[in-house]
Amino acid sequence: MSASQALFTPIRIGDKTLKNRYTMSALTRNRAENTYPTHLIKEHYVQRANVGLIVTEGTLITRQGTEWPHAPGIWDSQHVHAWKQVTDAVHEAGGLIYSQLWHTGRTSHPEAAQQKISEKPVYGPSAIAARGGKFREVAGEPGYVTPTPHPNPWELVQQYKDAAINAKKAGFDGVELHSANGYILNQFIDSTSNKRTDEWGGSIENRCRLVLEVAKACMEVFGSNVGIKLSPCGGYNDVGMPLQETIETFSYLITELDKLNIGYICLLRYLPFMDPAFDGVNRATQHDVFATYRPFIKNTKAMFNGAIKPEEAEELVASGKADLIAVGLGFISHPDYVERVRHGKPLDNQISMAHLQVTEKTKDWSVGYNDYPNAVY
């Protein structure tokens, strides 16, 4: 099979057939007014419905546990109704769409608007604050706070399941579990943020328990139409373990996820811009994520993510190293990304980083969101 044929060959994920091997990776865009999706969000995803699978921006499973203003949620019936407008439109355009289920854990802030409304504390696995942090909506741009250890993580499992139930009501084809980038599932996995001594911490098996229980709960709703995103290198949001512990932890976790017959496992490789330095020392644990963990993915599909250009994507899929390629920023500025790659057109739209996420001063939320041009074919 030629490389170009490989990228544009259909593939089965769960009970759905994707028309090509590209997925649109989740990227927080902050266009949901008071957490509810609008016509702008619908238009954004419809513009990109030619991709094999759309994964929405991180969608909050509960009001408690949010980091950014105007991030979408999926915890009530109004969310279900609003998202149904989006999924119906994407399906009408011939696309498939998953909801990425998100809880930020210790990276929320007690003064963030939705967090305050929830009247709940900032939860994490343990009372250990992440270093860094920047909250655009909170005066003075404070850093992260010391979280309250979650008193009963089984409540989190139920919140994820409830969110999956709502996602199904809203017409999503499946869900992706955001277990990367230092958010709550990743916080439980990582021994630097999880110092618990109960069934949810300590050993590798205990630290991975929450992720596996959440995956099983969501699969009770969607079957194998469930994916998961992992970032073994850590770094972002102050997570990351020593190399040997990292390899042992993620090898175990991926093996157990693979046994569940989950739909796909998305692996994010090391990216310099997601590797902050604290006291002059970079945080991430650099290693070859794709080569290290691909052998443990045997029963499900392997999705690779991390600034993968078309030429590399072709090689990865044609060689069988990857089944799918997730692209984030490329899809933001190129709604016709798939067709550009198919026809050899340049990916030459310049992304407006200033408009990647809105602020309270942003007047027109469509700028840098739905106004990128397609190529001429």
Image (cartoon, rainbow, N blue to C red):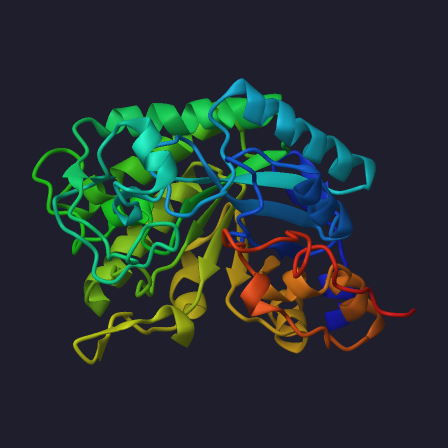
Q: Quadrant of the N terminus?
A: bottom right
Q: Is residue 83 above or below residue 331?
A: above
> Based on the displayed image, in which of its 4 quarters is residue 230 positioned?
bottom left
Taking 247 as reference, is 228 above or below it?
above
Q: Is residue 337 left or right of residue 353?
A: right
Q: How many marks?
A: 0
Q: Nearer the viewer, residue 148 or 120?
A: 120
Q: Residue at x 54, y 71 (%)?
A: 307
Q: Quadrant of residue 263?
A: top right
Q: Quadrant of the C terminus?
A: bottom right
Q: Position of residue 238 (x, y in %)?
A: 25, 61
Residue 347: give x, y in percent of width and height.
73, 74
For this orientation, the residue located farthest to the bottom is: 280
Left or right of 241 in this view: 174: right
View extreme (left): residue: 197
Percent x, y for residue 55?
A: 59, 46
